[in-house]
Amino acid sequence: MNEKLAFRFAEVTEAAALAGYQWLGRGNKNEADGAAVAAMREQLNDMPIDGEIVIGEGEIDEAPMLYIGERIGMGGDIVEIAVDPIEGTRMTAMGQSNAITVLAAGEKDCFLRAPDMYMEKLVVGPKAKGMIDLNLSLMDNLQRIADVLEKPLANLTVVTLAKPRHDHLIESLYQQGVRVFAIPDGDVAASILTCIEQSDVDVMYCIGGAPEGVVSAAVVRALGGDMQARLLPRDQVKGSSVENQQIAATEIHRCQMQGLEVNQVLTLSQLVSSDRVIFSATGITQGDLLRGIWRDGQGRLNTETLVVDGITKVQRRIQSVHMASREL
């Protein structure tokens, strides 16, 4: 994959962020997501690549999506794409912090191909690489991580999603003296923060979407961190109603068709098999990882984008100035 494509992928996430920004604070997450999808698709189709969307977003919450198997590009390098046009559609709709657009690109057969379903994820930075094992309890993992980081458990910082399915977990971590940051959405950004030296985040653990998990795995691998995950059928996560059982049966069948098993621990190399990846993320709203879109004194829109090259390990923060359209 041509390294010069990195800047083109930055333009893709910038375009998606600017499109989603039009719906900032307007209370309609699907319109925001649809605008970002359309902008991302247009930019990808204008690139000199022979690309395929191998993991997309939208099936879980019935939002618009770049669908799995969609072909994109004008022809050129063979590239696989994993996307989340807006990570944090609800945050965008409500004007909350930490909404970003994300994309990971890799060579052929680089990314795990999985249905859009739930995934359990455990992520750490480079200093704790090799110390995690989802076959163990979360507390056992946290103790191993604390030991290798040479800090007491009480000084460990874990990020998770503030979802009802995590309420009991969060309470138990509090009781063990672990510091927990519970965020409404945004586990890709939280995963990245485990690998950023200036960040206070040590661990990201949650049950979230599989697409976000694969995107996270790409950038975590590029940044030298570690991750394990497993696919979970809906009835295990949302309860065993008739509807959830029907959806779970479909998910399990789709996994079997792709040679995957639910509840099987997946290592980082199984999630992303090569270092030849490019990751790009652009901020929509102000966040811990990226600055959100802002206007300068001349009314122009400014974006901040993080681009990571898995081969060179170079991290770039790109600030771009865009002429504001009438819609914005």
Image: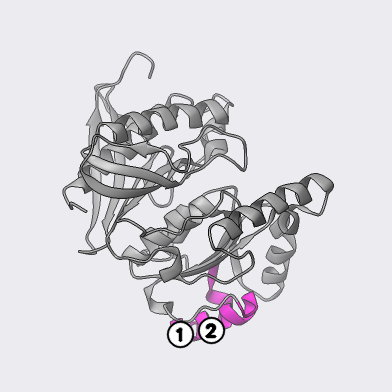
> Is residue 24 something that shows in the picture?
no
Callout 1 secondary element: helix
Residue 43 appears left or right of 143: left
Mark 2: give few (<14), some (14-19) or many (20+) Cα within 10 Å. some
Q: Quadrant of residue 141?
A: bottom right
Which element carries disc 2, helix, strand or loop? helix
- Tell me the quadrant of the picture where the C terminus can be found: top left
Q: Amino acid at mark 1?
A: Val
Dominant SS in magenta: helix
Amino acid type, callout 2: Arg
At x 50% / y 80%, what residue is drawn?
145
| Residues at discs 1 and 2 in contact (Cβ within 8 Å) | yes
The residue that appears at 20% across and 43% down in the rendered structure is: 76
Front in this rendered view, residue 263 or 212: 263
Give the extent of the magenta segment: 135-157
Horizontally, residue 290 falls left or right of residue 300, namely right
46 vs 23, left or right, is left
Q: Is residue 160 left or right of residue 300?
A: right
Above or below, 197 relative to 292? below
